[in-house]
Amino acid sequence: MTLFDGVYPFYPQPRKAYAFDVSSIIVIALFLSLGLSFLLILPGIRGRARLYWLFRVILSLFIGAVIVAVQFTGDWETGQVTANTSYKSFSRTMVNVDIGLHIGLGGVNVTLIGNPVNQINETINYNEHFAWRFGVNYDQIYKEGLAKGLPSPILYVAEKFSQQSPCGVYSQYRISGHYASATLWVAFCAWLISNMLFSMPVLVYGGYMILVTGAFMIFSLLSFSTVRNSPMCAIQFGPASLQIVYGASFWLTLATGLLCFLIGVVVVALHYLRPKALKAFFDLSEDKEEGDAMLGEAYGNPHFQANKKNPYDNFAMTIEAV
């Protein structure tokens, strides 16, 4: 048997660490494709309306992409610690590793990276996902990790979130993540409706719906934050402790929700204070509105009606006396 690029071709290959979330990549690629499609239309728009249109499209796609993408990310809460710990169960061999915890709405990722990566004749570079979405058995995934012989630090952290753990955080995280995801999908529906309303001469209602979008995004954060009501068990590796803080997805959702509030307030305020400026920004002139209104009315030609004669006016009956 010969080597091919340093490995034996018919033997199990060295495991590779999880690098990217496929769902997040699909969402980002989808919204980038939509953005590029809209950019193809840009040369056909004249004047300042081109800049306004580009700004509206980019801002709207950004909000929609954030609402969908954060549901598949794994960094709503994160934590990391560097420690010297045992690598395998029933072994006294110690390794120096970075242990990371990344909590999302649908599960938890535990990372283990060696310092250096190659130690004790092994490549220590792990990223294991344990899901708790409805329809998925977290404990079964944990048992499969035990059967695969995952390193002890990963199993130790994952065990804290199992149903049998005395920490009791499994149900809290599972239910909070479920309702946070549900409210985000409602926010996505409100975002779609707001885009449809902004394309019609009812801009103020589009402003109201973007306010609803921001409100449901804030509700999702409040739903996820309820996990802090349950005290988290200490995750200790000798003297080192793994502390959990809010991650990038949490703060990105908060920032986007506040952005939606800002957009909604500005649109509603301009509707009452500067309606002409608002119509100009959305390329909705008064001529277009009058044209749309005229489509529903019918006008007759007064000249034609004046000259129109009754065909019975020329009919007469004459009686002659004999």
Image: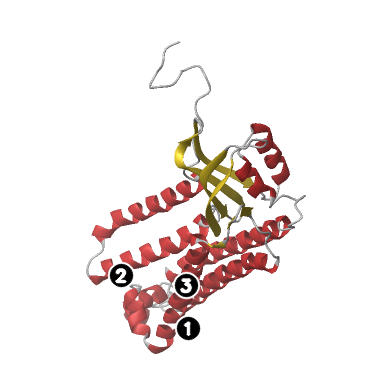
Residue occupying the point 36% across, 62% down: 58
Cα distance between the residues tagged 2 and 1: 85 Å
Q: Quadrant of residue 225?
A: bottom right
Q: Nearer the viewer, residue 281 or 174?
A: 174
Query: What secondary structure is found at the residue carrying circle 1?
Result: loop
Q: Nearer the viewer, mark 2 or mark 3?
A: 3
Q: Earlier in the sequence, mark 1 or mark 3?
A: 3
Residue occupying the point 50% across, 28% down: 14
Residue 92, position in %: x, y? Answer: 62, 37
Residue on which the image places disc 1: 321
Which residue reaches farthest top?
1
Relative to 321, say whether 65 is above or below.
above
The amino acid type, in three-letter code, at marker 3 is: Cys
**Residues at marks 2 and 3 touching, judged by CB atoms closer than 8 Å:** no
Residue on which the image places disc 2: 52
Residue 203, position in %: x, y? Answer: 44, 76
Which residue reaches farthest left?
47
Q: Earlier in the sequence, mark 2 or mark 3?
A: 2
Q: Is residue 117 left or right of residue 52?
A: right
The amino acid type, in three-letter code, at marker 2 is: Tyr
